[in-house]
Image (cartoon, rainbow, N blue to C red):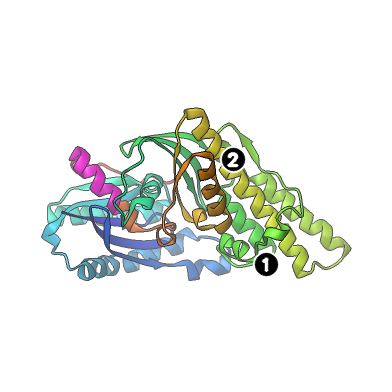
Amino acid sequence: MYALGIETSCDETSCAVVRNREVLTNFTVSSLRYHRKYGGIVPEIATRNHLKFIDKVFLLAIRKAKVDLKDIKVIGVTYKPGLLGSLLVGVNFAKALSLALDKPFLGINHLHAHLFSPFLNNQIPFPLPFVGLVASGGHTEIFLVKDFSQIKLLGSTTDDACGEVFDKVARAFGLGYPGGVYIDKVYSPDFRESFSFRCGRKGFNFSFSGVKTAVIYKKNELEKKQKLDRETKIKILSSFQESVVKTIVEGIEEAATKLGIRNIVCGGGVVANRRLRELLRNLEKKGFKIFLPSLAYTTDNAAMVAGIAFYLYNRKRETSNFKLEAEAN
């Protein structure tokens, strides 16, 4: 059987077809280029582009997969969290397809789908139970996952998400959007301890607003003395990135240790960060098993939505809930 996934939680319009965990097609159209000049996502622009492209992306995914619509057994659609207007486009499109094709649809939590992404295109056994980390532009959260139908939130950010502070710091330094990509490019291991920046963490909860402010203050302080050269900027940004990713890894390690769980699964756009992946891999030396998605599935995509929908449908045979409403952050 095949599952169709629909993802429109933010600025990516994505549709995918999967069979079990095999991704047959995963088409995504991003409106990122329209948001760059604003330094962040503009909800109105994102919603308009979803409306413009959702039917086209759906048809491309179906045709490329060479699957007959009657062979689609279940439709998975992201219904939370995200931008309300964006979510509404995907949810209503899924409901319409469900009625037209007489196929069930399942509402999928976008964050839970990120935790499924490391298992796409492979048949490794699910390492249940596991501690899950979702790190992205809008979220930094730790979960206890006993099954993909039994997921408990353990901790989250109390203010800015890690990806959000990357964007804001990058903007202060005149870099592009999304900021994490540019900061990761200029990051230098030689300069990662040039400045002492600290992130907040209490238990399984994070706070990144303070480090963002400290970095910007340090930049302004040094600029009062002289114009910052490239090396000084790299020292500040490298120290900043090191502080953020180390705090994330320390948090997920503490959660897994306290729960007595050795399996750690990660997902989300920030998991594409090279230094974060390196530090997570280093946890394997301490006896943890680390599961990371391929870079293609770190950002928002419909394949992870289709994959978890396939799993949940086969697990519980859930039926459509047409009272399901989109739920924003």
> Viewed as shown, does residue 203 lie left or right of 3?
right
Q: Can residue 255 be seen in this view?
A: yes
**Where's residue 314, x and y in %?**
19, 43
Residue corresponding to mark 2: 250
Instruction: Please indicate whether residue 208 sits to the left or right of residue 295 in the image.
Output: right
Image position of 255 with respect to 321: above or below: above
- Is the residue under label 1 in contact with that under label 2 (CB below 8 Å)? no
Residue position marked by numbered label 1 in the rendering: 174
| Residue furthest out toward the right | 225
Magenta run includes residue 185: no
Above/below status of 101 relative to 62: above
Q: What segment carries the magenta color?
A: 306-318
Q: Position of residue 248 (x, y in %)?
A: 57, 44
Among numbered discs 2 and 1, the one appearing first in the sequence = 1
Which is more toward the observer, 250 or 42?
A: 250
Residue in the image at 70% along x and 44% along y: 198
Q: Residue at x 50, y 52 (%)?
A: 136
What is the quadrant of residue 39 in the picture? bottom right
Give the overall secondary structure of the magenta segment: helix
Q: Can residue 91 be seen in this view?
A: no
Q: Which amino acid does label 1 sit on?
A: Gly
Q: Which residue is painted at 55% across and 34% down in the image?
A: 254
Distance CA(mark 2)–CA(mark 1): 30 Å
Residue type at mark 2 is: Glu
